[in-house]
Amino acid sequence: MEKLIIEAAINEQAPKSLNPQVPYTPEEIARETLEAAEAGAAIVHFHARDAETGALQHPGIELYTEAMTLIRAKNKDVILYPTYSSSPSPQERFSHVEALAQHPDIKLDFATLDPGAVNLGELHRGEAQYRADRPLSITHGEAEYFFGLCHRLGIRYSLGVRELGHVRHCIAYHRLGWIRRPILFKLILSDYHNWGMPPSAEAVTAYLTNMMPDDIPYRWMSYVYGPSHSRMSMLAVSMGAHVRTGLGDNPVLDDRVMSNAEQVDQVVRVARSIGREVATPDETRAILDRQPESAAT
């Protein structure tokens, strides 16, 4: 098997009310990033957030720059990447990605895209009122711009898929030549949301094994909200796939309030239990640049 790539999503939109260790400020973000990287995370993802309210700041260039500069002062290798939000144009939507890639002390070399559209609203079982009701949408034009930006600046990327149609988008983009490298799919499944399939081995088969043609190289990463997270992480590790964990996705995991580093360590211990090695940041870059040994990986 390839060495295991672990991504830590250290804050996303999770509130401190669920876990006081969710980082908001650049200093908190730097601390959690460095500890997660020390525990075994090769990739760390975070959102620029208001220090008091935790609200998402977009494009957040100053906050991202401050946090990433603090991180780079102590760790030159860990792979960092920001989120994105709605903007009037693709250029504005991804302006922070370009700025961070061109910053001499940061040199961002990773980003992400969630192709297609999905309602991210939460409607939990047994509840009469939804908790959120907001769509996420990436047009074909925005996707074309994103891939062009990444190729121009030498940025690697992952693609988040929540619906079967999102995989078809990626196939089409590869056929068009917009995607020019092996795909790293983040297979996003949830116990809480009403999009996609519930977390299961059958979902992996439906999204990837059944959908992906033999001539398009890809890898996948488990990315799960809810109680199924640890079970699906174990499945991914055993199948030769990769794992995303962190307080951003599950501020409370397995009924425990942990730090990001503790969640990463939990995945590392699963990998060690089956004799699978964990990839360093530089090994992760090399893995993402080469063809996978098989489409199942």
Image (cartoon, helix red, strand yellow):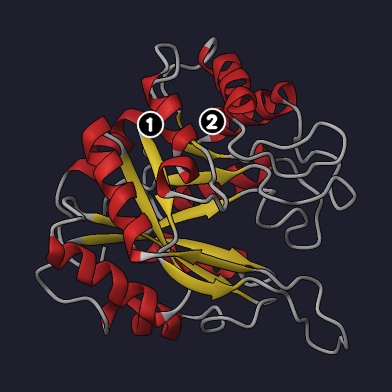
State the image coordinates of residue 64 (x, y, percent, origin top left): 59, 27
State the image coordinates of residue 53 (x, y, percent, origin top left): 86, 41
- The kind of residue tagged 2 is Ala
Instruction: Name the quadrant containing residue 229.
Output: bottom right
- Which residue lies under the disc numbered 1? 281
Closest to the observer, 124 or 209: 124
Lateral position of residue 64 relative to residue 180, left or right: right
Lateral position of residue 44 relative to residue 206, left or right: right
Instruction: Name the quadrant containing residue 220.
Output: bottom left
Lateral position of residue 124 relative to residue 47, left or right: right
* Mark 1–mark 2 distance (CA, rounded to whole Å): 9 Å
- Which residue lies under the disc numbered 2? 37
Name the residue rendered at 76%, 70% in the picture.
132
- Could you say whether the residue bearing mark 1 is in a helix, strand or loop? helix
State the image coordinates of residue 101 (x, y, percent, origin top left): 38, 26
Name the residue rendered at 62%, 40% in the picture.
58
Closest to the observer, 42 or 179: 179
**Image quarter (top left, top right, bottom left or bottom right) of the N terminus:** bottom left
Q: How crowded is mark 2: few (under 14 residues within 10 Å), some or many (20 or more)?
A: many
Residue, far front: 88
**Image quarter (top left, top right, bottom left or bottom right) of the C terminus:** bottom left
Name the residue rendered at 65%, 36% in the picture.
48
Instruction: Name the quadrant containing residue 130.
Output: bottom right
State the image coordinates of residue 62 (x, y, percent, origin top left): 61, 23
Q: With respect to residue 96, does 166 lie above or below? A: below
Q: Is residue 233 visible?
A: no
| Tag 1–tag 2 contact (CB < 8 Å) | yes
- Could you say whether the residue bearing mark 2 is in a helix, strand or loop? helix
Tell how many labels.
2
Q: With respect to residue 67, does 73 lie above or below? A: above
Q: With respect to residue 239, does 45 lie above or below? A: above
| Disc with the residue nearer the chain's start (1 vs 2) | 2
